[in-house]
Structure formats: C-alpha cells, structure tokens
Image (spheres, grey):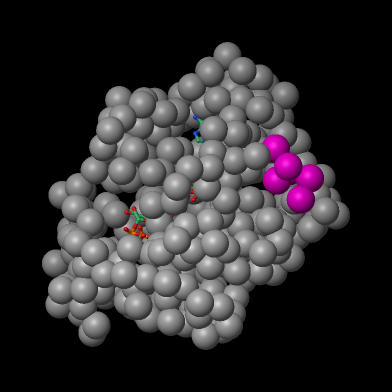
Amino acid sequence: MSILVTGGAGYIGSHTVVELLEKGEELVIVDNFVNSKPEVLDKLRKITNKDFKFYEVDLLDEENLEKVFQENDIESVIHFAGLKAVGESVQKPIEYYHNNITGTLVLLKLMKKYNCKRIVFSSSATVYGDPEIVPITEKCKVGNTTNPYGTSKLFIERILQDVCFSDKEFSVALLRYFNPIGAHKSGLLGEDPNDIPNNLMPYILGVAKGKYEILNVFGNDYPTKDGTGVRDYIHVVDLAKGHLKALDKIRKEAGTQIYNLGTGNGYSVLELVETFKRVNNIDVKYRITDRRPGDIAVCYADPSKAKQELGWVAEYGVEEMCKDSWNFAVNN
Ligand code: NAD
Ligand code: WQD
C-alpha cells in the first residue's frame, strides 16, 4: 500500500516527502516539473537514504496517470500539484483553472475508479479573502477571493466536500496554509522559483544574494504596527509535519476535516526583513513603494483546531525560518 504524492518535487511537497519517508511510508510521487527540477528526487534520496517510485506525469494526462493507479496500490493521496503564482493566474485564468481544477477532477476520477478514498489537499489562507477578523478560525467565512489562483482553491475545496457528501466512506483534509517559508536543515531543499519571485522571502533572498538590487516593500500605510502588511509565516518543515498528522486523522475518520496550518503569530514585512538581516548578518536594501493590488493588511491563523484535533503545533520561530531560508539560498 502506497501514498501518492502529487507535486512531490515542489517546495512543500518535497519537504513532506522527507517526513513521510522518515516515518517509513511507501511513496509514489507524480510531478511534471512545471515548477520544480528532477534533481530534487536525488536530494530526497540523499537526505533520507530511502527510495520511492516516481512518475513524470501531468495530472491532466489521464491515460498515464491511470498507469500510476494500475501499477500501485494507492491507499491515500496527498495532493500538492498545482500552479500557484497569484499574478500569473490573473493573466492566465484558463490555464490556472484547467491545471488546478481539471487536474484535481482527473485525479478524483481515478481515485474513485481504483477505490482510493482518502485525500489531503493543499489549500490556502487565500480562501478567506480579506478576513473579517484575525486570528482567522476555520469557521470564518470563505469566498471573495481576489484572483483565479485563490478561486481555484476555493472551488477545489467545494468539489472535495461534494465528493465526501456523495460517498460516506470518503475522507478529505483541507489544509489551509498560511505563508510557508524556510527550508530543510540540510540546505538541499527549499523554494527555488524559476521566475522573478512574487513572494516576500524568495525576493529577500534574491536581494541578499545580489541578484536583485532592492526589495520593494508594498505599502507602509496599512493599519498595522509599522504600516506594512502582517502575515503568519510558517516553517515549511512544520507545515510538512502537519500533513502526516492530517493523514493519521483521515485514516481513522471519514468526512471533511478543515485545518488552518499557521503559527498564530503575525509579522510585518519590515519585521521579517529586520529579523533576516540580524540572524544572517547580511544587509537587505529596501524601499517603500505603493501597495500591491489585491493585498490585504493582516492575515494570521488561529491554529488551535489543529492543535486540539491533530496534536500539531508549529515549533520553529521566525528566526529559524530566516536562517534556514538563507542556508538553502547560499547552498544553491
Ligand atoms: P510548487 O510549485 O513548488 O509545487 C507544486 C508542484 O506541482 C511542482 O513541483 C509542479 O511541477 C507540480 N505540478 C503543477 N501542476 C502539475 C500538474 N498538472 N501535473 C503534475 N505536477 C504538477 O508549489 P508549493 O509552494 O510547493 O505548493 C504546493 C501546493 O500548496 C500548491 O497546490 C499550492 O497552491 C499550495 N499552497 C502553497 C502556498 C505557498 O505559499 N507556497 C500557500 C498555500 C497553498
Ligand atoms: C507577504 C507580504 C506583501 C513581496 C501569497 C498568496 C497566498 C499564499 C501565500 C498560496 C505582503 C509583502 C511581498 C515583495 C512586499 N500562496 N511583499 N514585497 O501575498 O501574503 O500570500 O503567498 O496559496 O495565496 O497570495 O504572500 O509573500 O507575496 O507577501 O512588500 O516583493 O509581503 O505586500 O504584505 P501573500 P507574499
């Protein structure tokens, strides 16, 4: 019996694969490398000294994805594969909806055909839109997403809930990630975007390495402690561990479970930049620019449901996140 990890060569997927292999799980990974590199697979073997099966397959390619189900006894799926660049999704909505939603539908069709009834899904705090209150609990209203990427997550959540409703043996965990940063301690795995990064930490790393001249801080007139946006940054290894806990839960219980995976702490852009500079002893030049359209002021989680029901809490603080991000950047 194996776990199928879609998007397992990607940033969060690869860190989760390490945790799963270290726990002794049998894995089958599927990725089309649209946003990752084949070298990651060797790094996973090197870190864990364990092996897994890999298929270079696009989720949209039903015929080849079916082979994965034919050749393996898949008991659960952890579904990371998807496109995730917010700005690009506004430019290319059809590609985003097709890849993320159709990809999930193809996967679900095959899961049904091969009687696989458990799935952990990578959702996002973005489904809450501009939150009415913080910290955000799972009971907060979802919707009012501001871009096709976020809307694809919202729709997939709904599709998975409908599947659960139709089949009482089906179990789903919707994991709403806050802002994952950091990297594996080995320095071998981390976030390595192909294009100019949209997200804050990869951009800080680019400036610290001299690849970009200066960080644009998008607005300092938000109603926050220093006027810059506040987010719940979470170490990717903590996030990865949350998937194992969610998997334990859905192995025991049918139905839909929803969890926020965050630390519960909010840091401003300037706090993150200053922490990064201090712990890594390196300068990061920045300037204040206009707000980025679609951004919200404050977003952080109430992670107490995951603590109570899964026994999961994020252990690493923001200093560790900044150190590990930099360790990966200098090693790559
Ligand atoms: P990533 O781009 O590093 O990983 C996604 C992986 O999926 C990549 O390896 C990519 O090649 C693969 N992939 C994409 N489309 C595919 C397809 N059609 N068939 C096969 N493989 C495909 O991204 P990540 O940061 O690791 O994110 C993983 C998941 O978590 C995504 O679904 C993302 O939307 C979600 N998420 C990410 C964040 C974040 O800030 N990183 C936050 C919330 C949710
Ligand atoms: C964080 C803060 C920016 C870059 C996005 C997605 C969300 C989720 C995580 C997937 C904000 C500021 C950023 C820069 C800046 N992904 N910033 N200069 O926007 O909270 O969330 O990634 O699901 O869906 O929307 O993350 O890292 O882009 O921004 O000042 O060059 O940093 O304004 O306050 P965000 P981010």
Quadrant (top left, top right, bottom left, bottom right) of the C terminus: bottom right
User: Is 291 or 150 nearer to us in this picture?
Assistant: 291
Residue displayed at 40% across by 33% down: 100
As for residue 4 lying within the magenta part, the answer is no
- Most common SS among magenta residues: helix
Q: Nearer the viewer, residue 274 or 25?
A: 274
In the rendered image of this protein, does residue 203 appear above or below residue 279?
above
Q: In the current view of this chain or complex, which residue is farthest to the top?
A: 63
Q: Does 158 sit left or right of 196 as displayed?
A: left
Percent from the top left, x then y, of residue 217? 31, 67
Q: Quadrant of ligand 2?
A: bottom left
Q: Is residue 49 left or right of residue 163?
A: right
Image location of residue 86, percent across then percent down: 33, 45
Range drawn in magenta: 38-43
Q: Residue at x 21, y 73 (%)?
A: 220
Side of 7 where 172 appears, left or right: left
Q: Quadrant of residue 76?
A: top right
- 132 or 319, which lies in front? 319
Q: Is residue 311 left or right of residue 188?
A: left
Q: Residue 268: in sight, yes or no? A: yes
Q: Residue at x 70, y 37 (%)?
A: 38
Give the number of callouts.
0
Question: Which residue is located at x 29 percent, y 54 percent?
Answer: 126
39 lies above or below 105: below
Q: Position of residue 82 (x, y in %)?
A: 45, 38
Q: Nearer the viewer, residue 55 or 68?
A: 55
Quadrant location of the N terminus?
top right
Inspect this view and state whether residue 258 appears: no
Magenta stretch: residue 40 in it? yes
